[in-house]
Image (tube, rainbow, N blue to C red):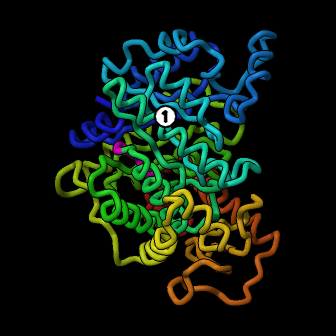
Amino acid sequence: MNFGDHVRAVHAGGALVVQPRMGMADPALMRAGLEAVERADADTVGTITLDSYTRTGDLESVRAALRDGVGLNGYPIVNHPAAVTRGVVAGLAERGFPVQVRHGSARPLHIFGALLDAGLHATEGGPVSYCLPYGRTPLDESVRNWEASCELAVEHAAEHGVRPHLETFGGCMLGQLCPPSQLVAISVLEAVFFHALGIRSLSLSYAQQTSAEQDAEAIGALRALAGQLLPDADWHVVVYAYMGVYPRTAAGADALLAAAARLAVDTGSERLIVKTSVESSRIPTVQHNVDALEYASAVARDRRRQLPGPAAAPAAPGTDSQVYREAAALVAAVLDGVGTGGVGGALVGAFKRGLLDIPYCLHPDNAGRSRSYLDEAGRLCWSELGGMPLQGIAPVRPGRRITSGDLTKALCHVQDRFDAVALDRDADRPVGAAEHELLEGKPV
């Protein structure tokens, strides 16, 4: 059973799959971390997160670090022999605990080669989402690298009788302040890109943003567009706990993770990437990750008991929301440009023409003419559309200037809101009550 099959089977049984971000350079520690996640009181899958040098292809620096005993911020899968990595994951998939490799590379061919050689078949990213926010690699170069990587995965699958799984990272662009319609559009477009290259087991990402109501609309739109454009694929949705400035208090962080877990359950999402209670201050330990996994899973179980109908029934796809109308327009405009260069060429062309334009993204291939803001209800909205095909579709406040103060306030909006719950509640007031108020969008 491949990664996607496992997630869908767990979901069909009425549970939410929860997953950490975790990567250690030492193979023994990496194995121990995976086993701790497997033992957690939750329905989990494993993660091997790679180090920054491997992500950028600086393998000489990895060699030097391993030789000199210098710490790395992840697992160097290319520099460790394939036999070593096979030992790290030996027996886990057979026990019903598949492992995904997470990396962050715009040039991932060396990473795909290493993970496939080690017997791993699940990874994530995308030609846009692992290019524009992370450096200055030209977008067309990223597209070519991702095309070659997908082709390698498909060839390997044909030779070895396995099925690779790819997760789009497009629903997480910049982590915050990108309006949900563009997150949905890029997540869908990257999935279509993978599908066109022969990948049939897919997951589509969406990162929790500033409004629970808007997030639910976005995931409904994501499911609707995936159903329309990926009819013969095996796909599921993965929600990411908030990726921006995180609450400083443990109670605030837990409340935010609880809101993410409830969002996943309410929208029929199959998998949740968690964050821990110490995200704002330090690198989480294995135990921090296990605690977050168990907490999110417990919240999800409680939420599911509150909902009517079959536990694993997905939410109805949402085609009548503002988020859907904007996302569908963006996707259609890009796919209208598909020609001899395929979906990858259409993505490159869309950014050149400004049809896709990530607010506050400084990459040279991003037009940089779009802007976003938080409205009074905490929803992410467009203040400037640039050349995106959203005129007459997206509401815009003409002439609204976004000052540095506005930007700072927006960046800290979620942190401040959830920390206020932790700091201002009565000493004997249960945290769950505050979390419920936040989930329902009540003022705090």
Q: Quadrant of the N terminus?
A: top left
Q: Is residue 260 visible?
A: no
Frontmost residue, 108 versus 219 = 108
Q: Can you say whether 42 is above or below 167 in the image? A: above
Q: Is residue 367 visible?
A: yes
Give the x, y percent position of residue 42: 36, 31
Which segment did they paint magenta?
200-205
Determine the residue positioned at 65% across, 26% down: 74
Q: Secondary structure at mark 1?
A: helix
Give the x, y percent position of residue 392: 53, 90
Q: Which residue is mark 1?
A: 152
Determine the residue positioned at 64% across, 64% down: 177
Give the x, y percent position of residue 182: 54, 67
The image quarter containing residue 60 is: top right
Frontmost residue, 122 versus 180 = 122
Q: Amino acid at mark 1?
A: Leu
Determine the residue positioned at 35% across, 62% down: 229
| Magenta stretch: includes residue 324 | no
Q: Main secondary structure of the magenta part?
A: strand
Q: Can you say whether 147 is above or below 398 in the image? A: above
Q: Quadrant of the C terminus?
A: bottom right
Determine the residue positioned at 54% across, 64% down: 346
